[in-house]
Amino acid sequence: MPRPAPSYRFRSVWRVAGTVAEVQAVLSDPGSLTRWWPAVYLDVVPVADGRPDGVGRSVELVTTGWLPYTLCWTLTITETMTDTGFALAATGDLVGSGRWTFTPDGPEVVLTYDWEVGAAKPLLARLSWLLRPAFAANHRWAMARGEQSLALELRRRRSPDAVVPPPPGPTSRRRP
């Protein structure tokens, strides 16, 4: 099947209390996604360890949003995580690339995520022309839950004994 051209270009900007090192610790552990970002990540299965610098590390993901569908895709690290960010590639139901950029700002970190992606899941690919606004809204919803969930995870890691509310959960538990 030919690779679809990226039909969506998203930029999400998060601002969380913490340091770049704390953000890196969370984002470098994909196995924890289902715990701290359960509104979107339903399952994470390691596929490859990659090189010692992290490049080539990949995981199979099952993700959802507020729309009633799930996506199965593989995330592969394509650039080493540094103090300024890292890059990844997506294959499967989603095909494209993403780049996280970290910018310290006093007691906070600004995270910018640039995501160029196309839908390869047949139903989504066929309906993309019609449902583009709904798919874009679904992405914004998912990323808003991510920012909220990362902020909670950083609080939880900083103060393990503090009472921190749980992250928002998924709107649907449907699995493919």
Image: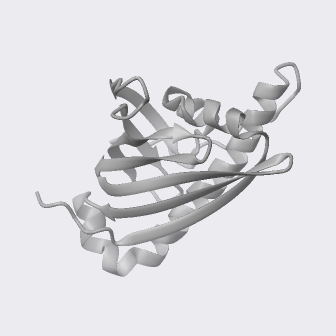
The quarter of the picture where residue 51 lies is top left
Residue at the image position 29 percent from the left and 52 percent from the top: 93
Position of residue 169 relative to residue 156, above or below, is below
The quarter of the picture where residue 128 lies is bottom left
Position of residue 140 relative to residue 101, above or below, is below
Residue at the image position 40 percent from the left and 70 percent from the top: 8
Q: How many marks?
A: 0
- Does residue 60 appear in the picture of this structure? yes
Task: Out of 32 and 11, give the one closest to the viewer.
Answer: 11
Task: Out of 41 and 156, give the one closest to the viewer.
Answer: 156
- Does residue 166 appear in the picture of this structure? no
Task: State the image coordinates of residue 175 (x, y, percent, origin top left).
Answer: 38, 40
Farthest-out residue, bottom = 130
Q: How is the image coloured?
A: one colour
Position of residue 87 relative to residue 117, above or below, is above
Where is the C terminus found, in terms of image quarters?
Answer: top left
Where is the N terminus found, in terms of image quarters?
Answer: bottom left
Farthest-out residue, right = 162
Farthest-out residue, left = 1
* Image side of residue 162 versus residue 121, left or right: right
Task: State the image coordinates of residue 65 (x, y, percent, origin top left).
Answer: 51, 54
Residue at the image position 57 percent from the left and 37 percent from the top: 27
* Image side of residue 159 versus residue 148, left or right: right
Position of residue 7 relative to residue 55, above or below, is below
Task: State the image coordinates of residue 173 (x, y, percent, origin top left).
Answer: 49, 41
Task: Out of 93 and 30, give the one closest to the viewer.
Answer: 30
Task: State the image coordinates of residue 60 (x, y, percent, origin top left).
Answer: 35, 35
